[in-house]
Image: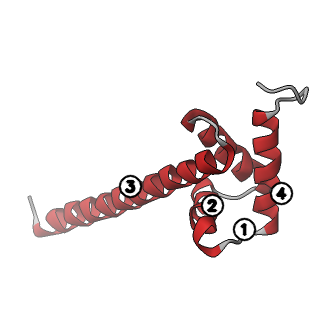
Amino acid sequence: MSDDAERRTFAALQAEIAQLRHAVTAHATVDQAVGVVIAHSGVTPETAREILRDVAHRTDTKLREVAEHIRQWPHCGWLPEEVRTALTAAVHARVEGPSGTGT
């Protein structure tokens, strides 16, 4: 293998490692946000993940960004208004259901 090919391979591996590190960090952030949603609303982990996805969709924000806001919420006591509104609506829809009688 030539030096140039080795450099390209090495660069590709470094890029892949960086992507994997980012993915692991993002996954941990989402997992922590799931815990916050569970503590806040008393839903199951699966429902908490659905709520996070719904908030991301409603706010047109990346899931990891929504998760970061929600993860920090217990420490700072603040959520962006758009995220707070979407979170309230998503929790309400899943906890009370569309008829208001529970799921």
Please identify, in this view, whether the residue under mark 2 or under mark 3 is nearer the observer: 2
Give the percent coordinates (x, y) of residue 45: 55, 37
Dot 2 or dot 1: first in sequence order is 2
| Residue nearer the viewer, 60 or 52 | 52
Disc 2/disc 4 C-alpha distance (Å) = 12 Å
User: Which quarter of the figure has residue 94?
Assistant: top right
Looking at the rendered structure, the kind of residue marked 3 is Val
Q: Which disc is residue 70 wearing?
A: 2
User: Which quarter of the figure has residue 99?
Assistant: top right
Residue 11 is left or right of residue 68, and the answer is left
Give the percent coordinates (x, y) of residue 100: 89, 30
Looking at the rendered structure, the kind of residue marked 2 is Ile
- Packing grade of label 3 (10 A; few <14, some 14-19, many >=20) is few
Marks 2/1 in contact by CB < 8 Å: the verdict is yes
Dot 3 or dot 4: first in sequence order is 3
Outermost residue to the left: 1
Dot 1 or dot 3: first in sequence order is 3
Dot 4 or dot 1: first in sequence order is 1
Q: Which residue is mark 1?
A: 79
Disc 1/disc 3 C-alpha distance (Å) = 24 Å
Label 2: state its secondary structure: helix
Dot 2 or dot 4: first in sequence order is 2
Residue 35 is left or right of residue 77, and the answer is left
Q: Which residue is mark 4?
A: 85
The mark tally for this picture is 4
Marks 2/3 in contact by CB < 8 Å: the verdict is no
Q: Which residue is mark 3?
A: 24
In which quadrant is the C terminus drawn? Answer: top right
In which quadrant is the N terminus drawn? Answer: bottom left
